[in-house]
Image (cartoon, grey):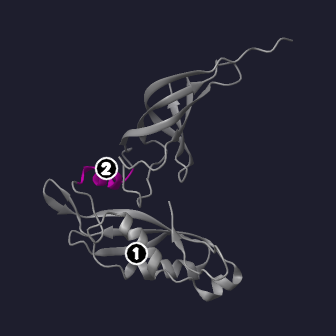
Amino acid sequence: MMAVPVFAQTAQDTVRARILFVDNLDKLIFTLEEEDGWLKVQLDGKPKAIAPSFYALDVRRGDTLTVAGVRKAAKRSKKSNESRLVSATILNVDYASDHDDQGALLLSMDPQPSFQGHGTSAFNKWVDANLVYPEPSRKRGSEGRVRLRFTIEKSGELSKVSVAESSGDPLLDAEALRVVRSAPAWEPGYVKGKPAKVTLLFPVIFKLSTPKKNTGSFSM
């Protein structure tokens, strides 16, 4: 039986489609719904046009992404109707009716929240500098990621700091909470010239790089 040849094609494309699956949020891989099948999307890097680098993009099934990029699709067969959009960037996010509007609110802020006048990356460095690896966790070789949720109030103060996703180690969770709760005030974001509060997700990574280096580092 002769094999059916597959023809790859590359073209710049813009797609607006509903999210069927969030394959990997940290790596920004999604499966979108098209009229005649599915489209796998791998987004480029950290979408700074959508959110600051500290913000974990909060998209869920049912939301709609508008993305632009290079499509690489094989000739569709009866066995598969999946294509792939690589090197994609987000143009817009439309949230489903049952989704909170925090991501959309952050997009509308001008300027967006900043930390100590040096942008959001300064908060990453501040957390990294003040994080202390719990000694019992270090001895056990315990590593993990703590995803925190907090609100930047209109005053710039942080409130409602809580664990949205545990690392699995209560000591690591507690240390991440301690550091973020002790952080100085931010410069709030503004909407139409007025300060506005917004709730964000912030991941803190605890990783033992060498036996003598016990600090955790922030990463998306």
Q: Earlier in the sequence, mark 2 or mark 1?
A: 2
- Quadrant of residue 144 within the rendered picture: bottom right
Closer to the camera, 118 or 115?
118
Closer to the camera, 51 or 167?
51
What's the amino acid at mark 1? Trp
Residue 63 image offset from top left, x and y in percent: 43, 42
Q: At x 64% / y 73%, what residue is drawn?
A: 209
Q: Label 1: state its secondary structure.
A: helix
**Whether label 2 touches label 1, CB < 8 Å:** no
Q: Is residue 131 above or below residue 51?
A: below
Residues drawn in magenta: 99-109
Q: Which residue is mark 2?
A: 104
Q: At x 55% / y 79%, what residue is drawn?
A: 215
Q: At x 56% / y 30%, what residue is drawn?
A: 38
Q: Is residue 91 above or below residue 133?
A: above
Q: Which residue is mark 1?
A: 126
Q: Is residue 211 left or right of residue 95?
A: right
Q: Is residue 18 above or below residue 127?
A: above
